[in-house]
Image (cartoon, helix red, strand yellow):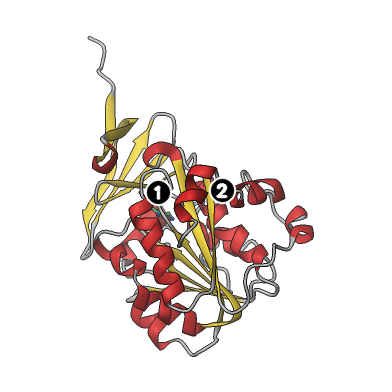
Amino acid sequence: MTEQPRWFREDCDEAGSAFSLQIRGRLHQEQSPYQTIEVFETTHFGNLLVIDDFIQLSARDNFFYHEMMAHPAIYSHANPRRAAIIGGGDCGTLHEVLKHPEIEQVTQIDIDERVTRVCERFFPELCASNDDPRATLLFIDGIRWMEEAPAGALDIIFVDSTDPIGPGEVLFSRDFYAACHAALGEGGIIVQQSESPLLHMDILRPMIEDMRGAGFRDTRTLCFPQPTYPCGLWSATMARKGLPFDGFREEDAAHPPFATQYYTVDTHRGALALPPFVARQLADV
Ligand code: SPD
């Protein structure tokens, strides 16, 4: 008798859709103090990290998201040296950020140590830079850490959160953005994963309003593919303290001292060139 294919399925209730990946089996499941963490072995996308039933990353396609979380913000800052990552426990963003030699220190604060420990085991490629002397990994409340950070201490803040439900919800709030604003120096940049511009305008618009309400004068949303997330189109939103955005360091971005799989000067420019259906909906925020 032939064996029936087995599937992991993520339901997206707000879009009346679902996305499935064929799996060989579940490699890991645990309930941490904060969330349910699972890892599946897929047939074609490598290992798959799922938190509270939502796909966080696959080994095969996480480069879209992690490169677009890291490189546009770094190349948009004139002199990025001090960074913090809030969330990001899988360490994929950290791995990209540390590819930049100009980054002198990165503190990653994720409340759930178990995510990092599970990823060290099942996604060692994402955790390959965790021992970099420039990196500090803390497993505490990122909001409190940000509130207590010295004023002006950071150049870039990466908010690599889950969806805004569960522990990730507070990372989409005006109070949190105000703490980030205070912790950034002049010209400092925050970049936040901002869900799907096709499905989640009800999250994206208030998020931008909250960033502006927290003191950030200028924001830029980047659109890029993320095949294993709902509908496959995703976004990250950058906000800058003080002066408005003024392009990015294109000469440096054209010659990165590392290889990329998605990020180039052109994909950076393309991500900033919002499709009309997105631009129209963000025009008045
Ligand atoms: N719908 C899932 C959105 C998850 C965004 N964060 C993923 C974390 C990868 N480092």
Q: Mark 2 or mark 1: which comes first in sequence?
A: 1
Above or below: residue 144 compared with residue 166: below
Label 2, secondary structure: give it. Answer: loop
The image's mark for residue 122 is: 1
Circles 2 and 1: CB atoms closer than 8 Å: no
Q: State which mark lies toward you, 2 or 1.
A: 2
Question: Mark 2: which amino acid?
Answer: Leu
Judge from the rendering whether residue 188 lies leftward or rightward of residue 284; answer left or right.
Answer: right
> In this orientation, which residue lies closer to the viewer: 233 or 138?
233
* Spot occupied by residue 10 in the image (x, y as percentages of width and height): 28, 39
Judge from the rendering whether residue 245 lies leftward or rightward of residue 217; answer left or right.
Answer: right
Q: Is residue 116 visible?
A: no
Which residue lies at the image location 56% right of the left edge and 48% below the top edge?
274
Report whether the residue tagged 2 is closer than 8 Å to ligand 1. Answer: no
In the image as oriented, which residue stretches furthest toward the bottom? 150
Q: Which quarter of the rendering shows the C terminus?
A: bottom left
In the image as oriented, which residue stretches furthest toward the front? 284
Above or below: residue 244 compared with residue 10: below
> In this orientation, which residue lies closer to the viewer: 241 or 213?
213
Q: CA distance from mark 2 to mark 1?
A: 35 Å
* Spot occupied by residue 7 in the image (x, y as percentages of width and height): 28, 29
Instruction: Count neighbours of disc 2 (C-alpha within 10 A) and say few if under 14, some if 14 to 19, many if 20 or more.
Output: some
* Spot occupied by residue 134 in the image (x, y as percentages of width and height): 58, 74
> In this orientation, which residue lies closer to the viewer: 19 or 236?
236
Q: Is residue 157 visible?
A: yes
Q: How many marks?
A: 2
Above or below: residue 62 compared with residue 163: above
Residue bearing mark 2: 274
Above or below: residue 77 compared with residue 195: below
Question: Mark 1: which amino acid?
Answer: Phe
* Spot occupied by residue 39 in the image (x, y as percentages of width and height): 32, 45
In the image as oriented, which residue stretches furthest toward the top? 1
